[in-house]
Image (spheres, coloured by chain):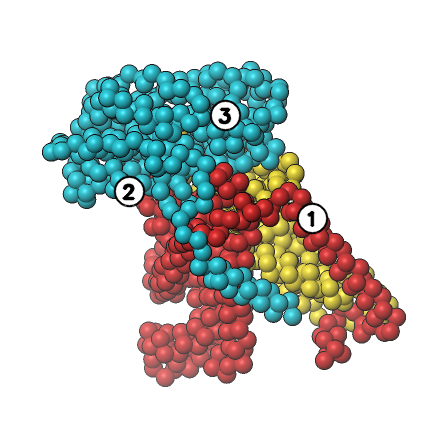
Amino acid sequence: MNVLTDNLSLYWKGFLGTVELTFFASILALVLGFLMASFRVAPVGSFRAFGTAWVTVLRNTPLTLLFFAVLLGLPRFGLVLPFTVFAILALGCYTSAFICEAVRSGINTVPRGQGEAARSLGMTFGQTLTHVILPQAFRSVIPPIGSTLIALAKNSAIAGAFSVVELLGTYKTLSELGYNIIWTFVWIAIGYLIITLAISALFNFLEKRWGFAR
Amino acid sequence: MIAKSLRLLAALAVTALAATACGKEGTPPVKGPSAAELPQYKIAQGFSLPDSPTWKKAEKRGHFIVGAKEDQPYLGEKNPADGTYSGFDIEIAKMVSASLGLDPKKIAFKTIASANRETALQNGQIDYYVGTYTINDLRKKIVGFAGPYYMAGQSLLVRTDEEDIKGPDDLAGKRVCSAAGSTPYQRIKADYPKAELVAYDTYSICVDNLLTYQVDAVTTDDAILLGYAAKVPEEMKLVGKPFSEEPYGIGVPKKDNALRFALNDALEARQRDGDWKKAYDATLGLSGEPAPKPPAIDRYPAN
Amino acid sequence: MKALRHDATALYDIPGPKTERRHKMYGAVSTLLVLALVGWVLYLLFDTDQFTYTKWMPFEYTGIQELLLRGLGNTLKAFAMAAVLSLVLGTLLAVGRLSDHKPVRWIATLFVEFFRAMPVLVMIFFIYVALKMEPLAALVAGLTLYNGSVLAEVFRSGINSVERGQREAAFALGMRKTQVMTHVLVPQAVRAMLPAIISQLVVALKDTSLGYLITYEEFLHAGKLIASNLDYDLPFIPVVMVISPIYIGMCMVLSWFAQWVAKRQRRNPKTEAADVAPAEPGTLLPGTQ
């Protein structure tokens, strides 16, 4: 039981590490995901091809392999970055593929008439997408994006297994210090539950505020 | 269209692998010690240890199952091509197996990560563990230790072009890599808080990071670092004097005191008859460091 | 064909000759940019000596090839075990969640929600480190608990998505609940759920690589062993170049199989009564279903 009270600062650091990873990787994933989704519906063929390739490759790559490749591969090109940044890159790029698919299916739920009306007003593809389609699509993709980001928070555990920057990573130090391993894990599990429930609550709120089921 | 071409690419990759499946025999050239130079250990005849459940199980099986490291050159390294293990720790495992009457050539080595050594010993995955296992009181509560068979000390490994780091006191603001949760990691954290610590699950990632300029130094026991430096002396070197004492022991299941005492006897005998030095010279000794005086065996009572 | 493709989207007009030219230009420029990027990466690869003989030579040896194949075999073994056990566990949990007995329903719901909310890696580490199981057993158990729980949700929503009239008609014919399930609902639901089930199996296949982190000697582990060897000059990039196409290829084949099944099912009149959305990997939001 005293695993938590004795090591509050260690747990707190791990917890913050997970939050940090999740937050920055989410931003990267959302930006890349929306970008790739617009690529995938763009009128230019090579954009569509690029978007499709991005999604197909990343969705079918095991995240552990991606971590491994980013963590040890990029330094070989002379890139010097802290581990956290590599972890954010790997997590963000991986998740962007799933965000992209969620957004794309959201775009498909927007009635055709909306796009047609926008076009008849003389809007370009970019304007149609950013002013008319995406704002409406966003409302119906709140739940799937929420689940994708929860999956991202859970996937950040892989970073903890490679290093100690994250909640799961704290178990290594604690087991070396000889603490009861079961309780160590109970508190780690509760930490993850807090984070996933918080994201879930946030998206429930967003959905109540702006959500729109079609 | 894209899907189709990607599918083609995947198919090509698989065929390429299948096509190369008829390759060269043997193993790629190895820089470490080769088996021909390694000492042979005489197997004790008629040895029996009825008080040790671990030994009885191994005897029935015909060989020991030994936990080891797989990525530490000159200490415990697994050859990817043929799966054999080599290094000083491996020699120690072999010599004590011979002393306990079981053929060292038949030992089944098993890679166990640092963080999971106690687990492996507790649940009987392995009979004993020889892999840079530092004896300390905390671990003694969970597992038993025979030995020590080697006295290592924490040291620093840097790139050969490194001028600034000459010892642990120069680490302020430098990025130092060690294995997550390990003893060296905790010591740097406590004694040299100004160093910027980087942790990975294995030392091989740390060394990789050192060579790609992600970190400025790797810290752990000098024996481990010597092994790496000896593999590529033109790229890495050790600096400073060891700043700790890390007695390496053979980890055994905690309750099996009979096995622990027998291993102590075996180690002492091997130190006396020169096999210990022979093993050192054939492995770690290749780095140019002369064999040290083996440490005194710590025969702590059963508890 | 072309006109049809453009017609399929409401986002932009069918381009006129001028726009067509502009799009072609965009296409050419972006293709050039991508090609330049590829060229730059290739240059970097050559520049950092990734194609030297020492780095690629290990792959010539049968010992190394066998190591990789053994790793691949272990990956597939873990996947097969996890897939079968997940399907079994998923079925059991779905039956529990659809049970008429409240306590059974509660326990099954609690179980499913807990394991869907936990990172699968934390489960694997917990089983490996705290419950002290062998790496393979820990990996399979972790994957089974997680994917079984997700599949239970897939099964449940599949059964629930069969048109109400089907169930009502069956009950009206005097069938008992078990009969309604086995003769009417499950046969229709399974066909419709098949794509979602296969998609979830892709997730399980990808997650077998987590075994690398608990020293299970699977495909990635074999690659790491070669990549971190100083004798071969740390051939990390070559190893990634060899193992990632195989990993990605395996997952893609399974994904395509799921899509193919989905396409076939859509044309299949037997599944008309059930309408199942494709399962997105990861959990669904609790509270929104």
Identify the element where label 3 is drawn: strand
Q: Observer-nearest residue: A11 or B86?
A: B86
Q: Does B216 sit above or below residue B28?
A: above
Disc number lying in front (2 or 3): 2
User: What's the residue type where badge 2 is placed?
Assistant: Ala
Distance from the alpha carbon under mark 2 to that under mark 3: 30 Å
Q: Which chain is red?
A: C
Q: Which chain is yellow?
A: A
Q: Residue at x 42, y 56 (%)?
A: C69
**Badge 1 vs badge 3, beta-carbon distance below 8 Å:** no
Which residue is under mark 3?
B219
Quarter in which the C terminus of chain B is drawn: top left
Q: Which chain is cyan?
A: B
Residue C208 horizontal/vertical position (percent): 44, 53
The label on residue B108 is 2
Q: Observer-nearest residue: A106 or B220?
A: B220
Question: Chain under label 1?
Answer: C
The label on residue A109 is none
